[in-house]
Image: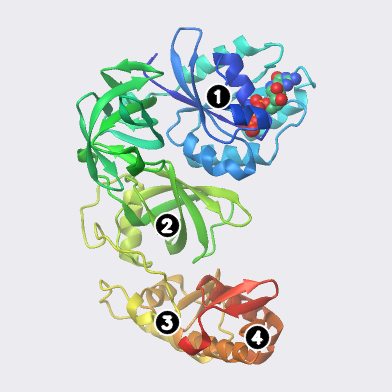
Amino acid sequence: MSAAPLTLGTAGHIDHGKTALIRALTGVDTDRPEEQERGISIELGYASLELPSGRRLSVIDSPGHERFVRTMVAGATGIDLYLMTVAADDGVMPQTREHATVLRALGVKTGVVAVTKSDLADPDVAIIEASELLGGAEVVPVSARTAAGIEELRAALERAAESVSSRADSPGEACLHIDRAFTIRGAGTVVTGTLWSGSIARGDELVLLASERHVRVRGVQIHDRPLDHAEAGQRVAVNLTGVPVTDVARGDVLASADAGLRPTYLIDARLDYDDDQPAPGSRVHVHHGTRETPARMAWLGGDFWQLRLEHPLIPARGDRLVIRQIAPPDTLGGSQVLDAHPRKHGPSRALLARLERLARGEEVPVGESLSERVRPTRSREVDAPARRAAPGVSEPLSASALAVERQLKQAGTEPPLDSAFDPADLAALRERGRAIRVSKNLHYHPEVLREIRDRLIELARGNDGAVTLAAFRDDLGTSRKFAQALLEHFDSERVTIRRGDEHFVRRPISDV
Ligand SMILES: Nc1nc2c(ncn2[C@@H]2O[C@H](COP(=O)(O)OP(=O)(O)OP(=O)(O)O)[C@@H](O)[C@H]2O)c(=O)[nH]1
Ligand SMILES: [Mg+2]
């Protein structure tokens, strides 16, 4: 049995008794006074839990409210075990499911389910629902009010802890994703977070990212006890010199210089979704560590996607990302970083082969598509076929790809669906900016698309800058299906913005 450090994170729907349960297990009320007053957790809470063997776990208590899922993701990042609560009188609810999706996305597979409030209702139905959602986890009925089941729960947590290995047992450079930064009188700046890998010792020189500022470790604490050094797998407080507290915040990363981390605006990743893949070009929220950013998803072939980030993330290869839908907010799934510093590219056979090798964990030599830092540019595919053509694309187009291009051009507003073509031909054209994906299974020729855009703008000009789907359809003389796909594309490309039934041209019409 390994007794190396581990971190446990709570999960579960609002009001399902997470904070009350942590108090029953640890004696610590992790809610701050204003949260206690309002009866709702807003921020992450921290405690330390003793198991029957005497082993201690770091605990992160997460809020359950649907508006705070992003806080829950920041807390769950880096945990080794989960404690999911399901209230006996309520059963599995939306955030029970969403938190379960987040945990799966982060690769947190081991944990225990507590069916809480079993003093209020028969826990049987909740036990069955929980087992269906999180098969494999032990399910323990408990009551924080009467303390029934609390010791059984502690024993179940010990068994779960025995079955996972600690991050401290894997080699790695220091990396800590900061969730709080504050000052302590006489000590200066302190940052806290879950130490993902490596160790941090007093006197270490580390780098703070994204600022790339060099800092020195003045002291390390675990569970409020000063220590010489801290190992991965637990919550750590680090006292730093060389940085004022105003220059650090949640989302920053404290790492060893040898970890080689640096901010990126582009990530090539493999998606791992329960449901359908996203629509190419869709805008999502990407969470990594304690940081998050909106991003566009560009399809690279198979399950591989390029995430084009609006703000930088600081990932390493192999790290997990959580991908959330922006509106209505929901967790779509997870993804794994294959290349943290790719250049901006579309699909190609060579890239696909490379990504498949990276996904198998093979070392792929640093080659043409590695290590180029690219500033974000908002893609305006309609305007930019020439700019989009990747510099590495020198192979001539095949005869069949040229035939597809001709067909797309001649088809005008109603091109055949993608199923009519060889996907490789479409990919080759896309890569050169000679076909543009407009919806999940529909491509247009860029020249045709530009003409349609101009007609749309012309139409809007005569109608106070806006068009409706019906007016656009009639103007193009096409069917609703094509008109709708085109309007959604122009919305996503920020040519237009939708307000109710109308799509407004975004830029001043004279500019276009
Ligand atoms: N009767 C009974 N009440 C409980 C039990 N556990 C929690 N409660 C009550 O349920 C309410 C919500 O408990 P919390 O622990 O704050 O729930 P939470 O899951 O932390 O809520 P959020 O963090 O806001 O998502 C409080 O009024 C608790 O006193 C229990 O086992 N039995
Ligand atoms: Mg709570």
Instruction: Tell me the amino acid under the disc marked 2.
Output: Phe
Q: Position of residue 5 (x, y in %)?
A: 38, 20
Of the residues under marks 3 and 4, which one precedes in the sequence? 3
Discs 1, 3 touching: Cβ within 8 Å: no
Image coords of residue 406 (percent x, y)? 45, 89
Residue annotated with mark 3? 383
Which residue in the protein does label 1 denote? Answer: 30
Q: Secondary structure at mark 1?
A: loop
66 with respect to 382 (left or right)? right
Distance (Cα) linking label 2 and label 1: 40 Å
Residue type marked 3: Asp
Q: Name the disc covering residue 304, or none.
A: 2
| Alpha carbon distance from label 1 to label 4 | 56 Å
In this view, the residue farthest toward the front is 185
Q: Which mark is residue 487?
A: none
Query: What distance separates the C-alpha of mark 3 from that of mark 4?
Result: 20 Å
Q: Is residue 244 above or below residue 477?
A: above
Indicate the quadrant where residue 114 lies.
top right
Q: Which residue position holds label 4?
A: 472
Query: Which residue lies most toward the top here?
Result: 53
Q: Residue at x 40, y 56 (%)?
A: 311
Q: Is 194 above or below relative to 1? A: below
Which callout, 2 or 1, points at the residue further toward the start of the chain?
1
Residue lying at 32% horizontally and 46% vertically, measured from the top left:
317
The nearer-to-camera label among 1 and 4 is 1
Indicate yes or no: mark 4 CB to ligand 1 under 8 Å.
no
Q: Foreground: 475 or 510?
A: 510
Which mark is in front, 1 or 3? 1
Query: Label 3 neighbourhood size at 10 Å, few (<14), some (14-19), many (20+)?
Result: some
Q: CA distance from mark 2 to mark 3?
A: 25 Å
The answer to whether the residues at label 3 and label 4 have Cβ atoms under 8 Å apart is no
Q: Is mark 1 within 8 Å of ligand 2?
A: yes
